[in-house]
Image: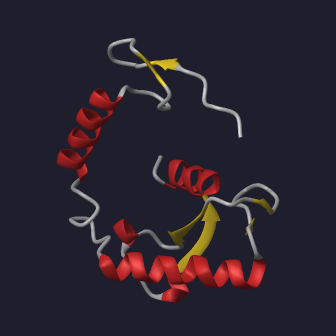
């Protein structure tokens, strides 16, 4: 694995290995996000969700290995699998197993950015 290239923080310009902000400004940005939209727990992502998500990812890996079914891209190998709500919680989705799908982080982010715009 190659080390991440250092990048300037979007706020202060300090070089960091983080994607966009130095540690200090990332914490500040996250705190602002939490104030604006509420923390994960406040939005309903409780221990029950974390348990259901972990079970969904484990079951997926047992059946399919490290393969993402893809979202608007072909299926592909991916070790960074995550659980995702088919119907988002914000739209009334539940933590029932029928409403959980497994995607890699990239597909999960792609789906989120398209479905929330």
Task: Check the image and name the residue furthest to the top.
Answer: 13
In which quadrant of the rendered view does residue 69 lie? Answer: bottom right
Vertical side of 67 occupied by 28: above or below: above
Image position of 68 with respect to 95: above or below: above
The image shows residue 99 at horizontal and vertical percentages of: 51, 81
Q: As drawn, is 18 to the left or to the right of 59?
A: left
What is the number of callouts on the image? 0
Residue 82 left/right relative to 92 = right
Compared with 52, 18 (above or below) is above
Q: Picture coordinates of residue 11 (x, y %)?
A: 33, 17
Query: In the rendered view of the protein, which quadrant contains the N terminus?
Result: top right
Tell me if residue 116 comes above or below residue 50 in the rendering.
above
Residue at point 76% right, 74% down? 65
- For this rendering, which residue is in front, 42 or 62? 62
Name the residue nearer the viewer: 45 or 47. Answer: 47
Whole-percent x, y for residue 107 in the image: 64, 55
The structure residue drawn at horizontal position 33% and vertical position 13%, both measured from the top left corner, is 12
Rendered residue at 39%/14% (across/down):
14
Query: Is residue 103 visible to the viewer in this orientation of the structure?
Result: yes
The quadrant in which residue 13 appears is top left
Q: Position of residue 45 (x, y in %)?
A: 32, 70
Q: Is residue 52 left or right of residue 69?
A: left
């Amino acid at each position: 694995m190659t080390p991440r290239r250092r990048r300037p923080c979007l706020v202060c310009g300090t070089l960091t290995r983080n994607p966009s902000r130095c540690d200090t400004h990332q914490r500040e940005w996250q705190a602002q996000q939490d104030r604006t939209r509420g923390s994960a727990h406040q939005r309903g992502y409780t221990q029950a969700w974390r348990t259901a998500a972990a079970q969904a990812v484990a079951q997926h890996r047992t059946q399919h290995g490290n393969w993402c079914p893809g979202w608007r891209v072909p299926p592909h190998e991916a070790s960074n699998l995550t659980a995702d709500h088919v119907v988002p919680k914000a739209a009334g989705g539940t933590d029932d197993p029928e409403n959980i799908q497994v995607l890699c982080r990239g597909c999960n982010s792609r789906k989120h950015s398209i479905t929330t715009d």
